[in-house]
Image (tube, rainbow, N blue to C red):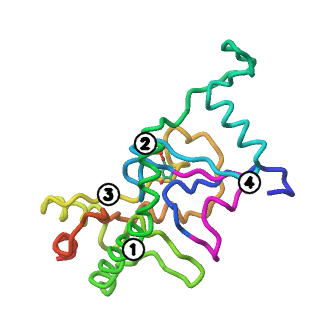
Amino acid sequence: MQKNNAVLIEDAAESLGTKYKGKYTGTFGDYGIFSFNGNKIITTSGGGMLVSDNEERISKVRFWSTQSRDKARHYQHSELGYNYRMSNVVAGIGRGQLRVLDQRMAKKKYIFEFYKRELGKLDGVHFMPINEWNEPNYWLSCITLNGQIKPIDIMEALEKENIESRPVWKPMHMQPVFCRHDFIGEGVSEKIFENGVCLPSDTKMTDDDLEKVCC
Ligand SMILES: *Cc1c(COP(=O)(O)O)cnc(C)c1O
């Protein structure tokens, strides 16, 4: 990064609480971002967070996000500004949610381990590997299939039981809007997209709910 003079912005949107080799995600790059959208491990109903060690840049971002108001009595703008402020209501929700992050992570881990115990032995079903150097937040339990069964078969079978599941995210470089742009990679994300299914992972799920998905 430094060598190439590149700025690294880490998309840690869904990984709040996760550690890689003892270090929290979102703290590896020059900047990290987290999402507090409604589907994340904790939420403020919407919005997110930018983190950085660079105080000077963070205060610049804060300046832009609060309409780039110059230090003057009247409203004066020498730079283009944005209204990306967090409201006090949202901040209040966020502070409350932070307190339950540990509980949420524990429940998400429980869900992951439930699925893994019930489904992990099936031929051709794989779960995300948990290594001794990573401590995920288990936000979403996903499986990958070995090609014989397709994600659509699983999703349709679940749908018949009124259970919602989804494909794993389509990689950015495969999105039509970015089709003209270069990308770096060796096909890993494509493979996961082709073979992956996201299982229901809501922290309100009961053992009965989890069993119903597995059976
Ligand atoms: C959720 C998510 C986003 C989008 O976050 P929003 O707050 O919904 O804009 C982007 N990247 C990743 C990896 C995510 O999980």
Q: Earlier in the sequence, mark 2 or mark 4?
A: 2
Q: Which residues are magenta?
A: 19-34
Residue 156: mark: none
Which residue matches tag 1? 106
Q: Is residue 146 visible?
A: no
**Tag 3 secondary structure:** strand
In the orientation shown, which residue stands out farthest toward the bottom?
121
Closer mark to the observer between disc 3 and disc 2: 2
Q: Label 3 to label 1, Cα distance in Å? A: 23 Å
Q: Amino acid at mark 3?
A: Arg
The residue nearer to you, when weighing 148 against 9, is 9
Quadrant of the image occupied by residue 115: bottom left
For the residues bearing labels 3 and 1, Cβ distance under 8 angstroms:
no
Quarter residue 160 falls in: bottom left
Ligand 1 contact, mark 1 (Cβ < 8 Å): no
Task: Please state if 181 lies on the left or on the right of 214 as rendered.
Answer: right
For marks 3 and 2 on the same chain, the one whose residue lies earlier in the sequence: 2
**What percent of the width, then of the height, locates residue 145?**
36, 73
Residue bearing mark 2:
46
**Percent coordinates x, y for residue 64 in the rendering:** 67, 30
